[in-house]
Image (spheres, rainbow, N blue to C red):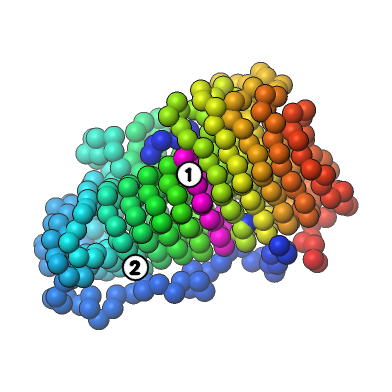
Amino acid sequence: GFRQQSDEGPVHPDGHVRLESGEKAHSQEEHCSCPCTRSRRGESGARGIFDITKLGATSDGKTDCSRELQEAWNSACGATEQAMVLVPKGEFLVGPLNFSGPYKGSVTIQIDGTLLGSNDLPKYDRGSWMNILQVDNLVTTGSGTIDGQGTIVYTKDPEAQAFPNSLLPDFMKNGTVSCITLLNSKFFHMNIYMSEDVKAENLTITAPGDNPNTDGIHIGDSSNINVTGATISTGDDCISIGGGSSHIKVTRVTCGPGQGIIVGCLGRYRDEKDVSDVTVKDCVLWSSTDGVRIKTYEDAVKSITASNLTFKNIKMEDVANPIIIDQNYCPEKVSTATKSKSEVTVKDVIFRNITGTSSTPEAVSLLCSEKQRVAASTSSTSMWSATGRTTRPLGCAAMPRAPPRTPSRHWPAS
């Protein structure tokens, strides 16, 4: 069975992609052109560099360094020139952080060491770990790691609620997060909320497959968000795109294992807004429970629309549900409905040049609402599975697909 999905809401990929057998991931080194190593200006004592060790932080992974990191941020915000918050090599234990703007000059957070998230949950007060609030033009980069230490929390208290997101860009404009590794988050690794013109580039995001709700990147109520070059392996969605999101581009992402790249879940919240203009292309998914998915609540509380959704040039290997539109989603109960009555409209959806293998009989599943018809095109899609069957209940207005081919475990030549 599949792990129950988290309820993403206001919580705030023409031509085939060719992949040689056994190749599963884009290497970070191949795509990463960002300054992942510290420049000469980052040397200790340089003007405008706020090195947390010079402020008293101890790199033993045990001493709480929250105060020193927060002090470095506050000092960088007060600088009138270019400023850098520097986390050098070493392990630094930190609790909840508030990186709020505005600031006077420009700021870079350079993470070359490892930040370890405190597992003292009451400290977070049901909030996130690293909160980036109301800042413009912030660059967060480096060769280091943001380690939420979530595996420890799930082992001790797997039923606990209100785990913190690791990185929360909130009301950010023109921001970049690049090259760092996000590891073992307690909840979402990165949650982009109410933000504009944000780039997430060449990230590595990893969590155990049995840690639920550890989405790689969630995007909600945001516009002009570009995710490119990421390698993501988590216990939940690699990338999830929630309500109120528009002009979202996901490119050259490798996902797996995990629960795929999804739009949803939509329709749970009364203040939820439409989703539009989402493009997912040139991606690779392997050994994931879903491939590309659109999901809406069966008993949606608000009528919204998801439109202009394009998935193209995607390679899949042993993916359980390669293409799925699910308007019968109800995680809190077992659905008894044979037809969904979801009020969410899904239209102008394109699935193009999606190739690979499915680990389940159905390669394409369109579980659509009897109230709101889905308009979807699956042109030039070649997907091998055990039988090559397609599940398509009444209510789905789908354009003709290419006829099924003989089951195969090999990639198409073209």
Give the mark nearer the N terminus: 2 vs 1: 2
Q: Position of residue 44 (x, y in %)?
A: 16, 75
The residue sitting at 14% across, 75% down in the picture is 47
| Above-or-below relation of 400 to 46 | above
Bounds of the magenta segment: 236-256
Image mark for residue 142 = 2
The kind of residue tagged 1 is: Ser
- Other-residue count near label 2 (Cα within 10 Å), few / some / many at <14 / 14–19 / ≥20: many
Image mark for residue 245 = 1
Queried whether the magenta region covers residue 276, the answer comes back as no
Q: Does any portion of residue 152 appear in the rendered image?
A: no
Q: CA distance from mark 2 to mark 1?
A: 28 Å
Instruction: Left or right? Give the position of 268 relative to 376.
Output: left
| Above-or-below relation of 160 to 198 | above
The kind of residue tagged 2 is: Gly
Q: Nearer the viewer, residue 355 or 156?
A: 355
Q: Nearer the viewer, residue 307 or 28?
A: 307
Hey, which residue is sitting farthest bottom in the picture?
40
Queried whether the magenta region covers residue 238, the answer comes back as yes
- Identify the image quadrant of residue 323: top right
Q: Position of residue 132 (x, y in %)?
A: 28, 51
Q: Does any portion of residue 192 appear in the rendered image?
A: yes
Q: Position of residue 414 (x, y in %)?
A: 79, 66
